[in-house]
Image (cartoon, helix red, strand yellow):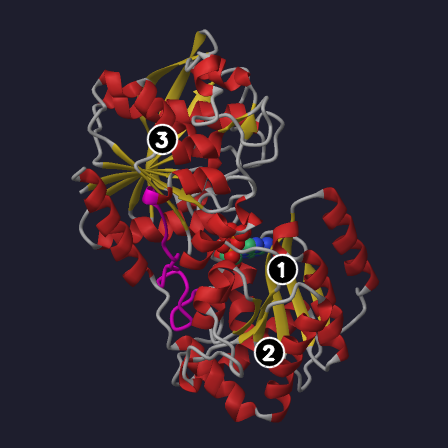
Amino acid sequence: MYIVQIASECAPVIKAGGLGDVVYGLSKDIERREHTVEIILPMYDCMRYDHIWGLHNAYEDLNVSWGGGSVHCSVFCGWVNGLLCFFIQPHSNDNFFNRGCYYGCNDDFMRFAFFSKAALEFLCVTGKRPDILHCHDWQTGLIPVMLYEMYKWRGMDSLRVAYTIHNFKHQGIAGSDVLAATGLGNEGYYFSYDRLRDNFNPFGINLMKGGIVYSNHVNTVSPHHAWEARYSDVSYGLGHTLDVHQGKFSGILNGIDYNTWDPETDEFIPHHYTAKNISSKAKNREALRERLLLRNDKKPIVAFIGRLDFQKGVDLVHHSLHYSLRRNAQFVLLGSPTGKEISDRFWSEKHHLNENPDCHLELAFNEELAHLIYAGADMIVIPSNFEPCGLTQLIGLRYGTVPVVRGVGGLVDTVFDKDYDENHEPEERNGFVFYQNDQVALESALERAIGLWHYFPDEFRQLQKQGMEYDYSWKTSGKKYIELYDFLRDK
Ligand code: ADP
């Protein structure tokens, strides 16, 4: 099969969160199964060029009709750990991808609508006819719309679209100017509720809704979140649309790339280990302390790694920091704040705790440090408000770092409480789970985890090993995507 992924991220070149990991890890798995996969991405000025091999101009004259005129683009091509990637670089005064950031601009809708159109135009004029276009999140929601309404008439009627929603919170609600710019036009047609009109904002078109309505299949990234999306409020207003399209909606659990995330070979950690010699993990704890100037003491390290965002439960992250310090543990936070208010709050906390030898707050995105924290910490806390899948608990498990999580979304599918999980035998349990979204609930789980470390170290070690024995690689999930692609192309 021939699959083209179109996305706004692909690790390690472009990564703001889990989307980048998934596009990369899934593509690697598809390639391992001997299918052909290519990835189309925007050519951001701030991406990690050092991770691209053999970057060269592959297509000089891509002209994309846009806003009544035409935008001239170059398409670069290069390999990211062996994966063939195409990067679209528009030459226009809008400077869509020369902003020093991936997201967060006022015209993000235009930037990614343009990218979507340019990706289709590139496939169209180069004669590339994949069996499957796999699109991700709102940034590429217009692709199935434009494919069906415009490009199908230009020899692209054989393509089928799989659309994956990694986060329902960000849907891309835009004005009619996007319709005009892309050339879709015909406001009346697209502004109908069974097409793109937002379910709550009658003046907006919803790009993610377009992806749902027009794709051949839609999935989110865990079975439990697929259920939540339909039956609770975590689909942020798209529940009805999912209900209408329930026959083509599913949940497929994310995996992680076991070559990137492997404590036996990880190039960013000083001491390698496996479940069998997990005692070597303690040396990474020492290395982490040394790097972050934490005191060497007989206490566990609790970590948080992630975007500092409402989604991640920042209030409870903040509380877990102070609670851990009170309960004789150390705390390490690696977080990228997503807004000014959250940023100010954690910067002020960082200054306040500057002299404390038991905690460190690193307010940045730092891939290398993340690896060392996964290896050096004893527990990872994930108190999310909602979590479509969550990768940090999967990476934590792989590194023997016990997850302490709120039971939502993909966390329910992957973490099983040591003391209370009734669906798993004691030897299958791998972490600590709490459900209520409050401090008391968090404390009940964190206290059990820290207590186990202090008072029952053998049991704690056993729990770490049980977590490491889980297989959350792409082995199972990749197979599910291949089966899905196969099913779609026969339709
Ligand atoms: P998200 O909602 O951000 O997609 P996930 O748990 O699915 O959350 O994926 C997060 C990914 O991003 C993981 O690989 C995690 O290690 C990484 N990550 C998040 N924040 C940071 C950071 N500040 N520095 C380094 N890596 C980070």
Is 253 a magenta residue? yes
> In this view of the protein, can residue 83 be seen by the observer?
yes
Q: Amino acid at mark 2?
A: Glu
Q: Residues within 10 Å of mark 2 (few under 14, many from 20)?
A: some
Relative to 385, residue 91 above or below = above
Q: Report the residue marked by disc 3.
A: 214
- Residue 452 lies, in percent from the top left, at 60, 87
Establish whether ligand 1 lies closer than 8 Å to the Cβ of label 3.
no
Check contact, mark 2 vs mark 1: CB within 8 A.
Answer: no
Quadrant including the N terminus: top left
User: Residue at coordinates 61% horizontally, 68% vertically from top-left?
Assistant: 303
Residue in the picture at 42% in, 28% down: 142
Above/below status of 283 relative to 238 = below
Q: Earlier in the sequence, mark 1 or mark 3?
A: 3
Q: x and y percent of residue 252 in the render?
A: 36, 54
Q: Residues under labels 2 and 1: Cα distance? A: 17 Å
Magenta stretch in the rendered image: 247-267
Q: Which residue is mark 1?
A: 334
Q: Which residue is mark 2?
A: 286
Q: Nearer the viewer, residue 475 or 236?
A: 236
Farthest top residue in view? 68
Q: Is mark 1 within 8 Å of ligand 1?
A: yes
Label 3 and label 2: CA atoms lie apart by 52 Å
